[in-house]
Amino acid sequence: MTQPTAEEREAQKAYWKEHSTEATVEAMMLDSKAADIDKLERPEVMRLLGSVKGLRVVELGAGIGRFTGELAEVAKSVIALDFMQNLIDQNEENNSHYGNITFKCGDATELDLPAQSADVYSSENPASVNLVIKREKKNPTHYRNPREYFAIFDSVQQVLPDGRVAHLELVCCKSVDTYVRVKQNQNQVCWKWHKVVGPTAEANASRHFLDGRQYTEEGIARYQAMFGDGFVSPGGIATTEEFSKLLHLSQDQNVLDVGCGVGGAAVYLARTYGCYVYGIDLSVNMILTALEQAAAHGNGDKISFEVSDATKRDLPDESYDAVFSRDVLIHVTDKPALFERLFKVLKPGGRLVITDYCRQAGDLSEEFESYVAKREYTLNTIDEYQKMLADAGFVDIVAEDRSEQLAQCLKEEVAKVDANKVMLADAVGEQVLDEAKQSWSGKLARVEAGEHRWGLFHASKP
């Protein structure tokens, strides 16, 4: 990470000196409605942080102490750091009575603490990212693309004296829901990482595989050229419309979109049913595209996106009315464990709808085995899927073989590309289109041979 220059730090100090003459929450957040936002955002961030009871906390950018007091109430100790003296002075005035806070004025990039002296690092201000954000005039803040943050955090590792390697593992990266709901702003983003020690630095291997192989920016462009803008699943908006009816959604219900891709289904569900949609996907490239498209399509106050691993992410129990997932669980090896998680997050009576690529029973051809291995898919038969859902506790399970519909979708998608080749080639390139058509032709051949199946599953929680 490039260290800030002296000129940059002075520019930052000058800017904040001008904008924080009054040490208030409005000045801290640069928003006249900051007090209202704070009431919603602070508990949201604290929930995401998790329990800090008995822990040693370092709070960066502590400011006037929006979070400092809450942290100090339960933590063993808190170091509150900010580079503006007047803000730290106000923080100390507000929170010194806790007795376990060390107040420091200084630069976070120059902070020097003993090794392993802290359990939690927290930064008060989630990052504003430069997806579609307009920079305030004269504001010296660096608005980075989220990919830059991921690159920075992924690069952090340390070889320990015993040869093991410490690195940071992603828990989640998400839009701050308060800003989504109150200001329709998807660009206020927060990250949660935890330190992991192992024999090697294998951080985020699955995420890197997806973003580096199948879901590159070029790959996503290819999928959207075939499926339609906003979609990376067979049938695009047509099948989304058809299958979402099985969820029986109503206004203001909460929907979890597992493997949300580039967000087309989330936008459709929010716009059509007026529900709140929470989309999670392990691919950074997918989520960044989803954020951009959600901002362009509106309904920004009802859609949130998150980069996280659905097999590991702990979401609140009984918090969703419905779960929707389109053709992504092929990437999940331990589906029974995932289905147990999805069962827990559903409210009683909640609905689940999944489509996924499946396989025929029995042996597969060498060509199909190679295709599956190259993409690191885990394919199950439709019957196996049904049993896993039942074992997780779901009832009223309907498992349908929709392979004929998949074949028809593939044919229609190739025909659409042929009919709009000039326009699509201008948008994504002729080579991308040719590769997509070749891939679709191979997929169609496997479907028609009976090896590659397409399952539709819907069920409910008692």
Image: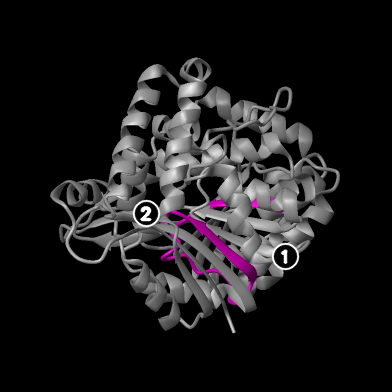
| Residue segment shown in magenta | 302-328
Where residue 22 appears, x then y in whole percent?
83, 43
Amino acid identity at mark 2:
Leu
Tag of residue 168: 2
Q: Nearer the viewer, residue 108 or 429?
A: 429
Q: If the image is split into quadrants, where does the C terminus sit?
A: bottom right
Q: Give me the C-alpha separation between circle 1 and circle 2.
A: 35 Å
Where residue 127 appears, x then y in whole percent?
59, 43
Query: Is 310 covered by the magenta stretch?
Result: yes
Total numbered labels: 2
Q: Residue at x 65, y 40 (%)?
A: 294
For marks 1 and 2, the one nearer the N-term is 2
Where residue 71 appears, x then y in whole percent?
62, 67
- Would you name the residue on which mark 1 appears? 253
> Which structural element holds mark 1?
loop
* Residue contact between numbered discs 1 and 2, judged by CB atoms under 8 Å: no
Q: Where on the picture, by quarter, is residue 194?
A: bottom left
> Which structural element holds mark 2?
strand
Mark 2 burial class by Cα count in 10 Å: few <14, some 14-19, many 20+: many
- Asked which colour scheme the image uses, the reply is one colour
Apparent side of residue 271 relative to residue 216 in the rendered image (left or right): right
Q: Nearer the viewer, residue 333 or 288?
A: 333
Q: Nearer the viewer, residue 193 or 240?
A: 240
